[in-house]
Amino acid sequence: MGFSMRLLWILLVPTIPISDFGLMYEYAKEIQQGNFTGFHNYAYFARFAHDTITVLYFSIFYNLKSNPLIIIKFMNVLFSTLAIYYMYKIVEQIYDVWLGLLAAFLLAIFPPFIMYNSQTMSENIAITFYLISVYYFMLVINKKKKFHGNELRNLCFCGLALAMANMFRMVGSVFLIAYIMYLILFRDVRKLYFLMPFMLLTYFIPIFLISSILIYNGITETHLWNSKEPIWTSVLKGTNFESNGHWNVEDAKLPEIYNHDPDKITQASKQIIKERLLNASPQKISTFYLYKFGSEWADPDMSAYEWATKNIPESSPTANLIRKLKSEILIVTTLFYLFLLYFSIKSLLRNRDRPEEISFFLLLFCGFVILLLITEAQARYAFVISWIFIILAIGGLKGRHVTDFKIQRSRSIKYSDLLRFLLSNGLS
């Protein structure tokens, strides 16, 4: 069902790559023709080297077709569908098969995970690999099942999948910190000293090797994690009171003012940030960050509808229909998001019977909250971790209704029964 809904969306909604997504898609054609100047000097992808792997990935499809947009979108659908399966596997490890199926169903119908498939964004691939990484981590920390010494193998797969995900969307460090903190806080530290180096090696070595190969072959000039535009410019935008921490022209011009010199940009950014925070009252700062937190997590579709429908050709037979249905789509998305938030909060209030593994997801969520408070705010930045609300909500849905309601492993699942369960449990 998840595959069908995603495929139908990309066929009906002729999304055109715009903004950063458009630059990545268009420059991939240049890459296929052997032009790597976009990765050199102070070109866009030299300044934002974290997009390098995504651009190279898009360039592969130009070998198949002169305009491979539909192929890239179809690959997004395949990756997103695979994410549904790994959502099932993760929740099945924490709870049981039934709740795993329920989590998969919720991710299958989660609107942003349908709408973003038509846009050429790296998160469509990265999220799947992040879920794979989390799944192998769950195999290691699961107390209910014994894996007879396979913890080492699973941690290596966890690190490798995390490396793949990070190369498409570089927030892997947040996951890595959450992994380490969880093992320190909730697992045997003596075992940690033996196992952790293997996960770290399988995470860092692939990234370093691929980055070094790209530099050696003259494709890029800097490592993937070392963009020529310092991370401090993102932090600078994130402290702009007038723009509520979002992108703004004033801060975006700073690299040009200093001729893209990384050292001067870093120094200037730190000075402006210091002045802003020291000259603002504690009340102004607290209000600013509270608003920034709310604006980051209060968008039900993480701006998916906007990014998927902006600049749709008027000639498209479905364009007007999609625009007419905007209100209905956003209402359904909002109700679904509120549903997830309600049961997530309900789950967190259940301290006595909450599985210990949920503490990992709380650590992970807190890590992203801190990251997005520090850096530039955009609603779509929360998309890469928004699946976490499904896992948290499952704990709120778990209870008498779930234990009384059984779904047997069979070739067909009665989704009407599943929907009735959701409605009755939600109303109760």
Image (cartoon, grey):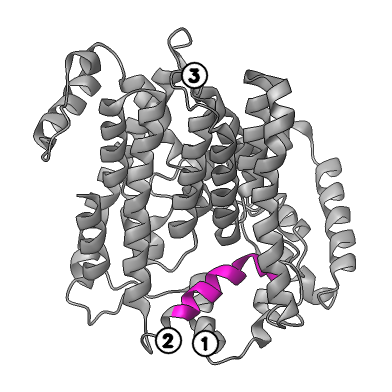
Q: Is residue 126 magenta?
A: no
The type of residue carrying mark 1 is: Gln
Q: Are marks 1 and 2 in contact (CB under 8 Å)?
A: yes
Mark 1 secondary-structure assignment = helix
How far across and how far down the image is residue 52, in percent? 61, 71
First along the sequence among labels 1 and 3: 1
Judging by the rendered image, the residue that carries numbered circle 2 is 63
Judging by the rendered image, the residue that carries numbered circle 3 is 143
Is residue 316 placed above or below 343 in the rendered structure? below
Using the rendered view, name the quadrant where residue 290 is placed: top right
Foreground pick, 75 / 156: 156
Judging by the rendered image, the residue that carries numbered circle 1 is 32
First along the sequence among labels 3 and 2: 2
Give the class, few, some or many, for how many residues have Cα within 10 Å of label 3's Cα (few <14, many ≥20).
few
Q: Is residue 301 visible?
A: yes
The type of residue carrying mark 2 is: Asn
Residue at the far top: name it. 352
How far across and how far down the image is residue 300, in percent? 39, 44
Q: Residue 125: which disc?
A: none
Mark 2 secondary-structure assignment = loop
Mark 3 secondary-structure assignment = loop
State which region is magenta. 47-60
Q: Is residue 341 visible?
A: no
Residue mark closest to the camera, 1 vs 3:
3
